[in-house]
Amino acid sequence: MTARTLVDTCAWIDFLRASNGLLGDAVERALAADQAVMCSVSVAELLQGIKSDAKGNKEKQQLEFLFSSVPCLSVVDDDWVQAGNTLGQLRATGVTLPLTDALIAAVARRHDLAVLTIDAHFQHLAVRLVPV
């Protein structure tokens, strides 16, 4: 079986918007190998970033195609607990991170997936990272 990769929101953005980004190229390889998966958190993050002009219509169509083509892993109750516990432990050490990143990391850990990202927050979240 081929190892799947959980693609972080920043990687999807690079794939969709950048013409020659290394991160976007890594997403393209994961898609071509049928290894890319997304998290429902990224769905919300991508939708909130759609522009409100004519270009936004194209972005919305691209996202609809992406959402229908790439498997999406949902956040479950235990992921919320894991994310909250992780963030609490990190905050006690002086590190404050976004809830969204902690949720994506919790989903990745539950499914034993590496995360494709350049977001430095994930270095604190005890997940395997895909080298870019």
Image (cartoon, grey):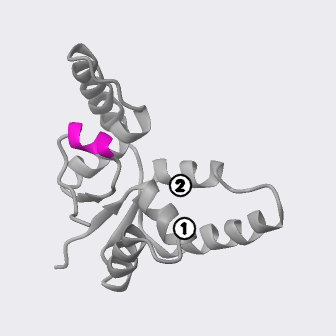
Residue that appears at 50% across and 76% down: 69
Residue 79 percent location from the top left of the image: 32, 37
User: Whole-percent x and y of residue 13?
Assistant: 51, 62
The residue that mark 1 highlights is 67
- Furthest toward the front, the residue is 20
Q: Are marks 1 and 2 in contact (CB under 8 Å)?
A: yes
Q: Is residue 54 left or right of residue 109?
A: right
Q: Residue at x 42, y 62 (%)?
A: 11
Q: On the image, numbered disc 2 is attached to which residue?
A: 43
Magenta residues (range)? 120-125
N-terminal-most mark, 1 or 2: 2
**Magenta stretch: dominant secondary structure:** helix
Identified at 63% across, 73% down, the residue is 62
Residue 25 image offset from top left, x and y in percent: 38, 77
**Which quadrant is home to the C terminus?**
bottom left
Quadrant where the N terminus sits is: bottom left
In this view, 29 is above or below 105: below
- Could you classify mark 1 by the number of other residues whose Cα lies within 10 Å: few (under 14), some (14-19), or many (20 or more)? some
Give the SS element for disc 2. helix
